[in-house]
Image (cartoon, helix red, strand yellow):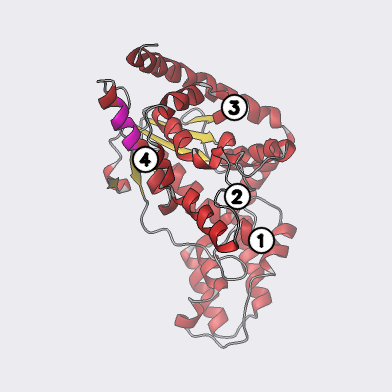
Amino acid sequence: MTRTLSTTLGTRSILTGIKPTGVPHIGNYLGAIAPALRRASGFQDAYFFIADYHALNSVQDPVRLKELTYHVAATWLAAGLDPTKVHFYRQSDVPEIFELETILNTITPKSWMNKMHAYKAQIDRNNKSGESMDSGINIGLYTYPLLMASDILTFGAEIIPVGHDQVQHVEIARDIAHRFNKQYRTDILTLPTYVLEEGIEELPGLDGRKMSKSYNNTIPLFAGRNEWTNAVKKIITDSVTHTPDSLKETTYYKIFKAVATPEQTAETAKVIIDGEICWARAKERLVDCLEQRFGAASVVYNDLLLHPEKIDEILSDGAKTVRKEAQNRLQVIKRSIGI
């Protein structure tokens, strides 16, 4: 069951988790961060959390995990997240989430976990490489959907914005909630609904593939001119004389259009097609646009990283607020099961 964004504005709560597994880039901002912040304004309660326990499946260096947690938190704050209007907290600061997960373990069939895409994909990779079926699979990966369900159900979140690869997890959370309510003759667990935002195009990276940290083809979101320049120089280009249609298919144009104004995009496209500027000058224009759009926020971002105690305070305050709700709901849940 899905809803489009336009039909959710009267709904009470929305929840988004952000894994600290890498430093966010402009693709993350345009495809996830900016849309999530726009959505939040339409809800009575918006829960945004740093999913540090989820990140443990892939980030097992404690120094790196802490560093990435600060980077991700600073990114969202610099991008415009207002902690006075949005519940912003660290997953690990809300132990009720993990207590609920233990309860959910007892009513969730193992067969549901066997069907999870990430688990099955790893098994397929192992089979193709000749490894044992469970090679590289920890219990954290296997039960990832259970922890995600607990993230959602702890707060009774109604709308969960996700990418296509996470739809199955929300559906499982819904099934778990329904099973629990039926088992214990209660309605304490809210059945969540996922939402996919329409119209967001996948941003290409410097090499033309999807912009991704795993491909090392990203443009940093919050940086300085030198760092942006070094990244933009690596965008693949060609020596073709472009028409309006062919230019629109280039990696450069797709990235430029995503960060520039419509007026800047039209004017730059014209001078490239007319042969008035070379690719090097066109790339300088892209750096100018990055500086104009993200320069002020980069100052905020870097100041937060220089003062991580500010981030800790914001996340701790957010956790204190949401824990009251989590404790109240968990108390009712435990009474339902006889504890």
Query: Three-letter amino acid code at disc 3?
Result: Ile
The answer, for residue 338, to whether it is visible in the render is yes
Q: Which mark is residue 216?
A: 1
The residue that appears at 64% across and 27% down in the rendered structure is 312
Relative depth, front residue between 254 and 132 = 132
Q: Left or right? Give the position of 77 relative to 308.
A: left
Q: Which mark is residue 50?
A: none
Q: Left or right? Give the position of 19 relative to 158.
A: right
Q: Left or right? Give the position of 133 relative to 111.
A: right
Q: Which residue is mark 3?
A: 314
Q: Nearer the viewer, mark 3 or mark 1?
A: 1
Q: Which residue is mark 2?
A: 135
User: Is 194 placed above or below 334 here?
Assistant: below
Q: Nearer the viewer, mark 2 or mark 4?
A: 2
Query: Three-letter amino acid code at disc 1?
Result: Asn
Label 1 vs label 4: CA separation? 33 Å
List x then y, in percent, for residue 221. 62, 52
Q: Which residue is mark 4?
A: 172
Give neighbour class at mark 2: few <14, some 14-19, many 20+ (Cα, 10 Å): few
Query: Three-letter amino acid code at disc 2?
Result: Ser
Whether the magenta-drawn stretch holds residue 177 is answered as yes
Secondary element at image label 1 = loop
- Sequence-wise, the earlier of marks 4 and 3 is 4
The magenta stretch spans which residues?
A: 174-180
User: Is 291 placed above or below 194 here?
Assistant: below
Label 1–label 4 contact, CB within 8 A: no
Give neighbour class at mark 3: few <14, some 14-19, many 20+ (Cα, 10 Å): some
- Sequence-wise, the earlier of marks 2 and 1 is 2
Q: Left or right? Give the position of 43 relative to 69.
A: left
List x then y, in percent, for residue 142. 50, 41
Query: Three-letter amino acid code at disc 4?
Result: Ile
The answer, for residue 190, to whether it is visible in the render is no
